[in-house]
Image (tube, rainbow, N blue to C red):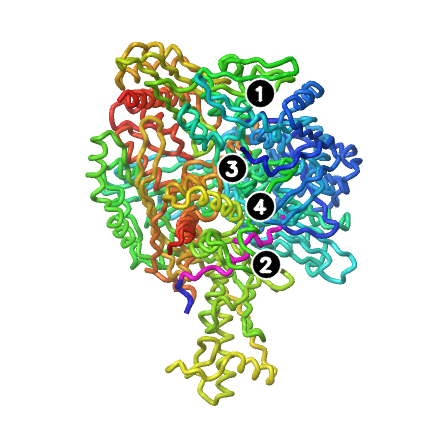
Amino acid sequence: MSWENSSQRGIAVKPAVFDYYSPQTVHEALLLLEQHGFEAKILAGGQSLIPTMNMRLASPKVLIDIGRIGELESIRVSEEEIQIGGMTRQFLIEQSPEVARYCPMLAEGIKLIGHPQIRSRGTVGGSLVHADPTAELPVILCTLGGAVTLASLDGERVVPAEEFFLTYLTTAIEPNELLVAVQFPRIQPRSGHAIEEFALRKGDFAIVLAAAAVTLDEAGKIAAASLGLGGVDGAPVKLDQVTDALLGLEPDSRLIQECCEQIRDIVEPESDIHASAEYRRDLSVTLGRRALETALGRARLSLT
Amino acid sequence: MGDHTLETPAANAPGRTLAQVHLKVNGVAHTVSVEPRMLLSDVLRDELGLTGTHVGCEHGICGACTIIMNGRPVRSCLVFGVQANGAELLTVEGLAEDDGPLHPLQEAFWEHHGLQCGFCTPGMLMTAYHFLQENPNPSREEIRDGISGNLCRCTGYQSIIDAVEQAARICRGGK
Amino acid sequence: MTIGTSVKRVEDPRLVRGKGRYVGDIQLPGQCEAVIVRSQHAHANLRAIRTQQAANRPDVLLVLTVNDLPDDLPPIPMRLSPEGSLELALQYPLAKDKVRYVGEPVALIVAKNRYAAEDAAELVEIDYEPLAPVASVDQALSADAGLLHPAVGSNDLFVIHSQKGSVEEKLKESPHVLQEELYVQRHTGVPLETRGLLAVYDPNRTSGKLTVYGTTKVVHFNRQILARLLKQDESQIRCVETDVGGGFGPRGEFYPEDFLIPYAAMQIGRPVRWIEDRLEHLVATNHSRQQKHRVTVGFDEEGRILALRDEIFVDTGAYIRTHGVTVPALTQAMLPGPYDIEALELTTHVVATNKTPTGTYRGPGRFEGTFVRERVMDMIAKTLGRDPLKVREINVIRPEQMPYSNGISALGQEVELDSGDYPRILAHVRRVMNWDGFAARKAEAAASGRLLGMGLAMFVEKSGLGPWEWAEVELLENGEACCKTGLADVGQGVKTMLAQVCSDRLGLPYTKIRVVHGDTAAVPKGNGSFATRGTVMGGTAAWQAADALRSKMLQTAAGLLQIETAQLGLLGESVVMQATGQTLLSFAQLLEECRRQGIRLREEYTFSAAHMTYPYGVHAAEVEVDQDTGRIKINRYYLAYDVGRAINPLLVKGQLVGGMAQGLGGALFEKLYYDETGQLLSGTFMDYLLPSSMEVPDVEVEILEWAPSLLNPLGVKGAGEGGTVAVAPAVANAVCHALQDYGLAITSLPIRPELIRQAIRQGKNRPKGAEVLS
């Protein structure tokens, strides 16, 4: 949840007037979107939107509450992936044994979102569309190479994570589209996931977070690896340069450390009141290394 | 799945027209007519007179307005009243009967000096209430984590953690 | 006997049931709601305020700007430490022709509810002519800075100077001289309940036409000010304290809204409520703490301080508020703390900037001064390569020097430390923390790559500010007692404390003592609750009043029983034989007799105190620093505090642990960040970081009763602020100790992990022992 300072407003705690719609089906929601377009905002869990509306930093004229569309709440496991309905509340992910089993990074990362009260209401789709650069779900989705399914009256399209997150609070979703589902790839055999974040206080948005996935071949060499960072740019950053260098190797801590050192030169974070760009760079190296090491350790554990 | 099983559809409500919202609060059914923009915290406090639920920031950080909605803790300043249509709510007023004995959590907060000004207390109690339902036998560190979404400016939390530890023991039937 | 026992609070059953009544909980028929339109500019001329559109809204009842207020409305006066020359820098309830900080009230809107009021607020158009903002003390004092208050003639609004001995000479003679600049950031109390008021005006009443709910802390004083500003007789105004969600200093002072809301209620003849929201709280309610210190200290080979000079710059914000120069004066007066320093020179500049005005926050001047002094003690030790605890032992005032005057005045009195055994508490903490054994543990941890450190800080507090406090105690017909007090209850447990004190004198269970406070209609006079004065002043007044009542009860009983008064006592709601405890007369019988004789069992007492009383203590921390991130983990935190006598140890502990959490917030997390244009960047709870349960460690507390105060019959010293004032230096000293090989010298707050990480990175590339200044 972030907002820009508004010179005219910014000191308010009650939302401005809006028209409220509570569609029962995706189709109804899409009709409303088509009708109201730019003036409308989708209300999912509301845990980012409502604070900004309370402060009148956002004053949408129309609010389309998708909270009663039952078809948007689901966790489905297929051979390849876990598909989660856009309106699925975060606590359900937290409690899901399937998610814990088939996508440990998601299970671990979801617990880092805010506090239980936030996860009671917050949704998977809401967090992804909000696209805060320090939020967990966008980084996880990018690191794992997942995708989102966007629906409009014209039909559905699947957008890969790396094409979905454009910049700060901005995604590829069109005003007439609704995020109906998100696909997280299932963890492969001989693999490990890890997520590490640094926040000044527990439950705050991270200053920097890092997520890593490592897959080993039967010989214990790295067959695939990915590393994603949040908090260092407007959108999640995937560090293929770093992980590519590890392919085919059996790295020790020192080699991982060396590889991660280059992160310092790759990322271009900005400074704010909570951390300087330099500190964010520094944390990127540390957290990237820790995430990779942990993921590798878990992958090795799965070999035995 | 989810919390919509108890909910009934909300009427669409353009602009300033009032929406009818049906709520069951602490076991009592209510119907209120409110603007769609009215926050659930304000519905409870101003429409239903249940002022035990406090608001400390109205942007979802302090946790003072925490209530239980359909079995889950939520920040009532981050829910519109209309979103709660058909929901079952528990607020601090529902933890104990008006003249009846205190809930073990309330009793433990009293005994351990788990409150000073009392402003964060209702939200803290509701968070702890749900926490103990999910984790009846928590460690001290788990309690610390469990209440971390509720800010307290008076106690330094130590006595609150003491109180939750004791309440957990009592609720498990221990002493 | 309940004094000294940890009884449960009488306040709590209502509060845990959610039955408390805070000001925002009150709903009266016809009640409407106000919002304040505030300046978005730090410094600007106000050219025009257009309110017509807002006023035209159907739900709007009233719009006020300065043009709607009386021309001769005076500014809000100083309550404490007034200085004549500062009257030119006081704040008016609504900005007149200039705004001087972001958040300054410019207009007020009353509407049927808060939603509608905010809708209207968006329609107010204000034309500003921006002026160059003065966003820092350095900028304020630079030659080309614009003046905030041209009538004062300088942004350096006021200077306080104190001197003892010959500092210049002593510095010349000193074998070692250390110079350092230290900085404490702007932060403040931030109670979890924001401020709020509800004003009700009924012109048809003959007296008490105006009732104001939500006043607290100093209700009688606030009534006096309100009467003056409204040109009403005090008898027409009733101020009522409701339940209060935390005080900590800022809450309860007289602010612009304390005039505006009653004034609005009088204009429209309907109850007007105003509940400050959190965002406006962070710009509207007093800030505190921001100071820069330039310290010069001379010392000998052993670490004995020979002379101390400190030039202090207080960033006081845009206006002088009710605290006058309280914080600057207290900073000076308490700066020497527990040390016997022969030569002192202290100069404090009260500097105006385009930021929110400031006032007191728990431990005002001592949080800042203790950080400075206790860091300097460790720096001296480091310079000499000596044990920091030893350096303190050499410098502390000895018990035989008590009472000890440090030669500096504040709040109208010279600091005269009444009692204390400072060497003993240092010896105590050495033992408790196993201070001497820590080096081995530290080395062992270092061998496995872990950075451990231990640090401590010593402090002296002040409590029991006079000049007087009032109480009345009455035994009621129903057998319960009523204690009226001039104190305020901001959540600290005043009622329980007074009930215990009265219970002790009256032989009545503390649960049968009803405490009445904070209502000017019920309590004729009082000075309120601030400066840790409650237990010392109000507790003593109640004790004396209850004692007088006790005498009256005993005398009455003696006459009835034909037994000498001296042989009687009060116990278990009865008059008893002192020696045997034998019950002679129940209170019911005594009351019956009094009724017959026309005796009212009621006594009052006004307790006066010319001098404050000075508790003291020590904080110690063991920390571990994560080398990779700079994160600080507090492994152990200990604090010992000699409060003379604890009325209720559980409540004293509550004050200390809670105070520590606030101190920790100031040490590690909280900061009101302003940019160079005078905009507040940390104006939400997402950016102003209050510590949560995950950040505050368990605190080991030892309440000591070694040196009871000789200035009151209970022997008590206040406990409210000692938990807060020494956290920053204790943690800073521990962190510096952990990083001694990296040469980190913490000189500013908050201590963010970034600072530590930076020192580690730089330290790895530099020779050991070199200082890194932050």
The image quarter in which residue A63 lies = top right
Task: Determine the residue positioned at 48% across, 85% down.
Answer: C558
Query: Position of C749 compared to C101: left or right?
Result: left
Q: CA distance from mark 3 to mark 1?
A: 23 Å
Quarter residue A252 falls in? top left
Look at the image and say whether residue C17 sits in the magenta stretch: yes
Q: Badge 4, how many Cα within 10 Å: few under 14, some, many 20+?
A: many
Element at label 1: strand
Q: CA distance from mark 3 to mark 4?
A: 15 Å
Q: Chain of mark 4?
A: B
Quickly name the residue at label 3.
A117
Residue marked by disc 1: A179
Residue B54, numbered label: 4
Q: Secondary structure of the magenta portion, mostly?
A: loop
Specify the amino acid type for callout 2. Answer: Gly
The chain under label 2 reads C
Looking at the rendered structure, which numbered label has been put on residue C173? none
Q: Position of residue A196 (x, y in %)?
A: 39, 26
- Please state the chain letter of the residue tagged with numbered disc 3 in the rendered image: A
Q: Which residue is mark 2?
A: C518
